[in-house]
Image (cartoon, rainbow, N blue to C red):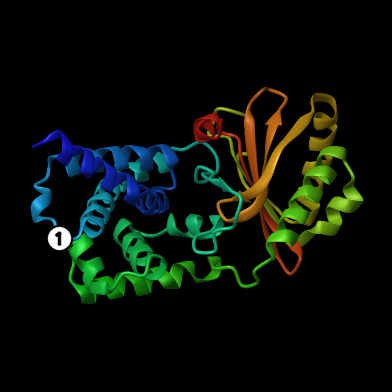
Amino acid sequence: MTDASQEDAGTGFAALRPALMRVAYRMLGSVADAEDILQEAFIRWMKVDRGKVLEPEAFLRRTVTRLCLDQLKSARHQRETYVGPWLPEPVVEEEEDEDVTLPLMLALERLSPLERAAFLLHDVFGLEFEEVATTIQRDAAACRQLAARARTHVREARPRYQVSRHRGLELAKAFFTASRSGDMQALGAMLADDISVHADGGGKRSAAAEPILGLEAVMKFHESLAVKLRESGSTLVRAGFVNGLPGFITLEADGELQTTALDIEDGRITAIYVVRNPDKLRHLH
Protein backbone atom coordinates (compact mmCIF):
# COMPACT_ATOMS: atom_id res chain seq x y z
CA MET A 1 0.00 0.00 0.00
CA THR A 2 1.49 3.33 -1.07
CA ASP A 3 2.14 6.27 1.21
CA ALA A 4 -0.24 8.33 -0.94
CA SER A 5 -3.01 5.77 -0.40
CA GLN A 6 -2.43 5.82 3.35
CA GLU A 7 -2.45 9.60 3.36
CA ASP A 8 -5.74 9.71 1.41
CA ALA A 9 -7.26 7.24 3.86
CA GLY A 10 -6.18 9.39 6.79
CA THR A 11 -7.58 12.52 5.17
CA GLY A 12 -10.89 10.79 4.49
CA PHE A 13 -11.15 9.60 8.09
CA ALA A 14 -10.34 13.08 9.42
CA ALA A 15 -13.21 14.54 7.36
CA LEU A 16 -15.65 12.05 8.88
CA ARG A 17 -14.23 12.29 12.40
CA PRO A 18 -16.67 14.93 13.81
CA ALA A 19 -19.71 12.88 12.71
CA LEU A 20 -18.19 9.66 14.09
CA MET A 21 -17.37 11.42 17.37
CA ARG A 22 -21.01 12.46 17.72
CA VAL A 23 -22.08 8.83 17.42
CA ALA A 24 -19.43 7.50 19.84
CA TYR A 25 -19.96 10.18 22.50
CA ARG A 26 -23.73 9.84 22.47
CA MET A 27 -23.43 6.08 22.74
CA LEU A 28 -20.95 6.19 25.64
CA GLY A 29 -21.39 9.52 27.44
CA SER A 30 -17.61 9.75 27.77
CA VAL A 31 -15.29 11.94 25.70
CA ALA A 32 -12.25 9.88 26.64
CA ASP A 33 -13.91 6.56 25.76
CA ALA A 34 -15.23 8.01 22.50
CA GLU A 35 -11.71 9.14 21.57
CA ASP A 36 -10.43 5.60 22.24
CA ILE A 37 -13.18 4.14 20.04
CA LEU A 38 -12.28 6.46 17.17
CA GLN A 39 -8.63 5.55 17.50
CA GLU A 40 -9.48 1.85 17.22
CA ALA A 41 -11.79 2.56 14.27
CA PHE A 42 -8.98 4.46 12.55
CA ILE A 43 -6.59 1.54 13.01
CA ARG A 44 -9.14 -0.81 11.46
CA TRP A 45 -9.78 1.64 8.63
CA MET A 46 -6.09 1.75 7.75
CA LYS A 47 -5.90 -2.06 7.67
CA VAL A 48 -9.06 -2.79 5.66
CA ASP A 49 -9.13 -3.25 1.87
CA ARG A 50 -10.67 0.16 1.22
CA GLY A 51 -11.10 -0.56 -2.48
CA LYS A 52 -13.96 -2.86 -1.52
CA VAL A 53 -15.65 -0.26 0.71
CA LEU A 54 -18.39 1.41 -1.34
CA GLU A 55 -19.56 3.85 1.38
CA PRO A 56 -16.75 4.82 3.77
CA GLU A 57 -19.03 6.83 6.09
CA ALA A 58 -21.49 3.95 6.52
CA PHE A 59 -18.63 1.47 7.01
CA LEU A 60 -16.97 3.62 9.68
CA ARG A 61 -20.26 4.39 11.43
CA ARG A 62 -20.97 0.67 11.65
CA THR A 63 -17.46 0.05 12.98
CA VAL A 64 -17.77 2.78 15.62
CA THR A 65 -21.25 1.65 16.72
CA ARG A 66 -20.18 -1.98 17.12
CA LEU A 67 -17.10 -0.98 19.09
CA CYS A 68 -19.34 1.15 21.33
CA LEU A 69 -21.71 -1.76 21.92
CA ASP A 70 -18.75 -3.85 23.09
CA GLN A 71 -17.60 -1.02 25.34
CA LEU A 72 -21.05 -0.60 26.91
CA LYS A 73 -20.96 -4.15 28.24
CA SER A 74 -18.04 -3.31 30.52
CA ALA A 75 -19.31 0.23 31.17
CA ARG A 76 -22.46 -1.13 32.82
CA HIS A 77 -20.40 -2.73 35.60
CA GLN A 78 -18.42 0.48 36.05
CA ARG A 79 -21.64 2.51 36.43
CA GLU A 80 -23.01 0.04 38.99
CA THR A 81 -19.94 0.54 41.20
CA TYR A 82 -19.66 4.32 40.61
CA VAL A 83 -19.53 6.50 43.73
CA GLY A 84 -22.51 8.88 43.86
CA PRO A 85 -24.65 10.10 40.94
CA TRP A 86 -23.22 9.45 37.47
CA LEU A 87 -23.34 12.22 34.85
CA PRO A 88 -21.92 12.12 31.32
CA GLU A 89 -18.63 13.88 30.67
CA PRO A 90 -19.52 17.49 29.87
CA VAL A 91 -19.16 18.83 26.35
CA VAL A 92 -19.29 22.63 26.33
CA GLU A 93 -20.22 24.42 23.11
CA GLU A 94 -21.19 27.91 22.01
CA GLU A 95 -24.46 26.72 20.48
CA GLU A 96 -27.07 24.40 21.98
CA ASP A 97 -27.52 20.83 20.79
CA GLU A 98 -31.25 20.27 20.44
CA ASP A 99 -30.90 16.59 19.46
CA VAL A 100 -29.37 15.07 22.58
CA THR A 101 -29.49 17.12 25.77
CA LEU A 102 -28.13 16.01 29.13
CA PRO A 103 -31.50 14.73 30.47
CA LEU A 104 -31.89 12.64 27.33
CA MET A 105 -28.38 11.22 27.75
CA LEU A 106 -29.29 10.21 31.31
CA ALA A 107 -32.46 8.56 30.01
CA LEU A 108 -30.38 6.67 27.44
CA GLU A 109 -28.41 5.17 30.33
CA ARG A 110 -31.51 3.22 31.33
CA LEU A 111 -31.72 1.53 27.93
CA SER A 112 -30.07 -1.68 26.83
CA PRO A 113 -27.06 -1.12 24.50
CA LEU A 114 -29.07 -2.28 21.47
CA GLU A 115 -32.06 -0.05 22.33
CA ARG A 116 -29.68 2.86 22.71
CA ALA A 117 -28.02 2.19 19.36
CA ALA A 118 -31.32 1.74 17.49
CA PHE A 119 -32.79 4.93 18.98
CA LEU A 120 -29.73 7.10 18.31
CA LEU A 121 -29.09 5.83 14.79
CA HIS A 122 -32.72 6.13 13.67
CA ASP A 123 -34.32 8.88 15.76
CA VAL A 124 -31.30 11.15 16.21
CA PHE A 125 -29.07 10.52 13.20
CA GLY A 126 -31.89 9.75 10.78
CA LEU A 127 -30.78 6.38 9.40
CA GLU A 128 -33.29 4.05 7.79
CA PHE A 129 -34.04 0.90 9.77
CA GLU A 130 -32.42 -1.23 7.06
CA GLU A 131 -29.12 0.58 7.70
CA VAL A 132 -29.63 0.34 11.48
CA ALA A 133 -30.20 -3.41 11.07
CA THR A 134 -26.95 -3.83 9.14
CA THR A 135 -25.09 -1.78 11.73
CA ILE A 136 -26.22 -3.62 14.86
CA GLN A 137 -26.62 -6.99 13.13
CA ARG A 138 -30.33 -7.44 13.81
CA ASP A 139 -33.21 -7.54 11.33
CA ALA A 140 -35.16 -4.36 10.53
CA ALA A 141 -38.29 -5.48 12.40
CA ALA A 142 -36.29 -6.07 15.58
CA CYS A 143 -34.68 -2.64 15.20
CA ARG A 144 -38.09 -1.00 14.93
CA GLN A 145 -39.12 -2.69 18.19
CA LEU A 146 -35.88 -1.65 19.90
CA ALA A 147 -36.35 1.98 18.87
CA ALA A 148 -40.03 1.95 19.89
CA ARG A 149 -39.15 0.63 23.38
CA ALA A 150 -36.45 3.24 23.68
CA ARG A 151 -38.86 6.06 22.76
CA THR A 152 -41.22 4.97 25.52
CA HIS A 153 -38.42 5.25 28.09
CA VAL A 154 -36.97 8.58 26.91
CA ARG A 155 -40.17 10.46 25.98
CA GLU A 156 -40.20 12.49 29.20
CA ALA A 157 -36.56 13.51 28.73
CA ARG A 158 -37.32 15.33 25.47
CA PRO A 159 -37.47 19.14 26.00
CA ARG A 160 -41.08 20.28 25.88
CA TYR A 161 -40.42 24.01 25.97
CA GLN A 162 -37.25 25.13 24.22
CA VAL A 163 -35.68 28.10 26.00
CA SER A 164 -34.09 30.66 23.66
CA ARG A 165 -30.30 30.73 23.44
CA HIS A 166 -30.15 34.29 24.80
CA ARG A 167 -32.55 33.65 27.68
CA GLY A 168 -30.80 30.40 28.59
CA LEU A 169 -27.37 32.02 28.88
CA GLU A 170 -28.88 34.99 30.70
CA LEU A 171 -30.38 32.68 33.33
CA ALA A 172 -27.13 30.73 33.63
CA LYS A 173 -25.14 33.89 34.38
CA ALA A 174 -27.78 35.12 36.81
CA PHE A 175 -27.74 31.76 38.57
CA PHE A 176 -23.94 31.90 38.89
CA THR A 177 -24.08 35.39 40.41
CA ALA A 178 -26.90 34.61 42.87
CA SER A 179 -25.54 31.23 43.99
CA ARG A 180 -22.02 32.58 44.58
CA SER A 181 -23.04 35.81 46.28
CA GLY A 182 -25.64 34.20 48.50
CA ASP A 183 -28.54 36.26 47.14
CA MET A 184 -31.20 33.74 48.18
CA GLN A 185 -34.11 35.93 47.10
CA ALA A 186 -32.81 36.17 43.54
CA LEU A 187 -31.89 32.50 43.51
CA GLY A 188 -35.28 31.34 44.78
CA ALA A 189 -37.05 33.33 42.07
CA MET A 190 -35.23 31.28 39.41
CA LEU A 191 -35.99 27.82 40.80
CA ALA A 192 -39.02 25.60 40.20
CA ASP A 193 -40.77 23.98 43.16
CA ASP A 194 -39.65 20.52 42.01
CA ILE A 195 -36.01 21.57 41.50
CA SER A 196 -33.33 18.90 41.84
CA VAL A 197 -29.53 19.03 42.13
CA HIS A 198 -27.34 16.23 40.77
CA ALA A 199 -23.62 16.42 41.55
CA ASP A 200 -21.01 14.03 40.14
CA GLY A 201 -17.81 13.94 42.20
CA GLY A 202 -17.01 10.31 41.38
CA GLY A 203 -15.51 9.84 44.83
CA LYS A 204 -12.65 12.15 43.77
CA ARG A 205 -14.09 15.47 45.01
CA SER A 206 -16.80 16.34 47.52
CA ALA A 207 -20.34 16.10 46.16
CA ALA A 208 -23.78 15.13 47.45
CA ALA A 209 -24.05 11.34 47.53
CA GLU A 210 -27.69 11.49 46.41
CA PRO A 211 -29.70 14.00 44.36
CA ILE A 212 -31.07 16.93 46.39
CA LEU A 213 -34.81 17.21 45.76
CA GLY A 214 -37.33 20.00 46.29
CA LEU A 215 -37.12 23.78 46.61
CA GLU A 216 -36.64 23.87 50.40
CA ALA A 217 -33.77 21.37 50.40
CA VAL A 218 -32.06 22.98 47.41
CA MET A 219 -32.29 26.46 48.98
CA LYS A 220 -30.76 25.19 52.23
CA PHE A 221 -27.99 23.53 50.27
CA HIS A 222 -27.17 26.76 48.42
CA GLU A 223 -27.30 28.82 51.61
CA SER A 224 -24.56 26.71 53.16
CA LEU A 225 -22.67 26.54 49.87
CA ALA A 226 -22.70 30.33 49.48
CA VAL A 227 -21.00 30.73 52.88
CA LYS A 228 -18.15 28.46 51.76
CA LEU A 229 -17.89 30.12 48.35
CA ARG A 230 -17.65 33.61 49.86
CA GLU A 231 -14.63 32.41 51.82
CA SER A 232 -12.95 30.30 49.14
CA GLY A 233 -14.11 31.88 45.87
CA SER A 234 -15.43 30.53 42.58
CA THR A 235 -14.43 32.10 39.26
CA LEU A 236 -16.57 32.06 36.12
CA VAL A 237 -14.42 30.77 33.24
CA ARG A 238 -17.05 30.88 30.51
CA ALA A 239 -20.76 30.48 29.92
CA GLY A 240 -22.02 28.18 27.19
CA PHE A 241 -24.12 25.10 26.54
CA VAL A 242 -23.18 22.04 28.60
CA ASN A 243 -24.50 18.95 26.85
CA GLY A 244 -27.14 21.08 25.18
CA LEU A 245 -28.24 22.91 28.35
CA PRO A 246 -27.40 26.50 29.37
CA GLY A 247 -24.57 26.50 31.89
CA PHE A 248 -21.03 27.48 32.68
CA ILE A 249 -17.53 26.37 33.60
CA THR A 250 -16.01 27.60 36.85
CA LEU A 251 -12.61 27.41 38.48
CA GLU A 252 -13.07 26.40 42.10
CA ALA A 253 -10.91 27.13 45.15
CA ASP A 254 -9.13 23.76 44.93
CA GLY A 255 -7.79 24.73 41.51
CA GLU A 256 -10.07 22.30 39.68
CA LEU A 257 -12.67 23.03 37.03
CA GLN A 258 -16.37 22.37 37.46
CA THR A 259 -19.30 22.47 35.04
CA THR A 260 -22.88 23.40 35.85
CA ALA A 261 -25.79 22.75 33.48
CA LEU A 262 -29.34 24.03 34.00
CA ASP A 263 -32.51 22.37 32.77
CA ILE A 264 -35.04 25.16 32.26
CA GLU A 265 -38.80 24.86 31.79
CA ASP A 266 -41.35 27.70 31.69
CA GLY A 267 -38.61 30.15 32.62
CA ARG A 268 -37.67 28.31 35.84
CA ILE A 269 -34.73 26.02 36.56
CA THR A 270 -36.02 22.48 37.12
CA ALA A 271 -32.69 20.65 37.48
CA ILE A 272 -29.06 21.53 38.17
CA TYR A 273 -26.33 19.16 36.98
CA VAL A 274 -22.83 19.66 38.39
CA VAL A 275 -19.77 17.69 37.27
CA ARG A 276 -16.82 17.85 39.71
CA ASN A 277 -15.06 14.55 38.98
CA PRO A 278 -11.64 15.70 37.66
CA ASP A 279 -11.37 12.61 35.45
CA LYS A 280 -14.37 13.87 33.47
CA LEU A 281 -13.04 17.42 33.11
CA ARG A 282 -9.52 16.83 31.75
CA HIS A 283 -10.52 17.53 28.16
CA LEU A 284 -11.76 21.01 29.14
CA HIS A 285 -8.29 22.13 30.22
Name the residue tied to disc 1: 54
What residue is rendered at 63% in x and 31% in y?
257
In the picture, measured across the screen, residue 71 lies left or right of residue 243, that is: left
Label 1 Cα crowd, 10 Å radius (few <14 / some 14-19 / many 20+): few
Residue 162 position, x and y percent, is 64, 69
* Residue situated in front as seen by the camera: 242 or 102: 242
**Number of numbered discs on residues:** 1
What residue is rendered at 29% in x and 60% in y?
114
Question: Disc 1 marks which amino acid?
Answer: Leu
- Outermost residue to the top: 254
What residue is rendered at 83% in x and 36% in y?
226
**Image quadrant in which you'd find residue 115:** bottom left
Using the rendered image of the protein, determine whether residue 240 is visible from the camera's viewpoint.
Answer: yes
**Image quadrant in which you'd find residue 56:** bottom left
In the picture, measured across the screen, residue 108 lies left or right of residue 168, that is: left
* Residue situated in front as seen by the camera: 8 or 128: 8
- Outermost residue to the front: 4
Which image quarter holds the N terminus? top left
Residue 222 position, x and y percent, is 79, 42
In the picture, measured across the screen, residue 211 lies left or right of residue 189, that is: left
In the picture, measured across the screen, residue 129 lies left or right of residue 192, that is: left
Using the rendered image of the protein, determine whether residue 206 is visible from the camera's viewpoint.
Answer: no
What residue is rendered at 76% in x and 31% in y?
234
Residue 193 position, x and y percent, is 77, 62
Residue 103 position, x and y percent, is 55, 58
* Residue situated in front as seen by the camera: 76 or 68: 68
Numbered disc 1: secondary structure: loop
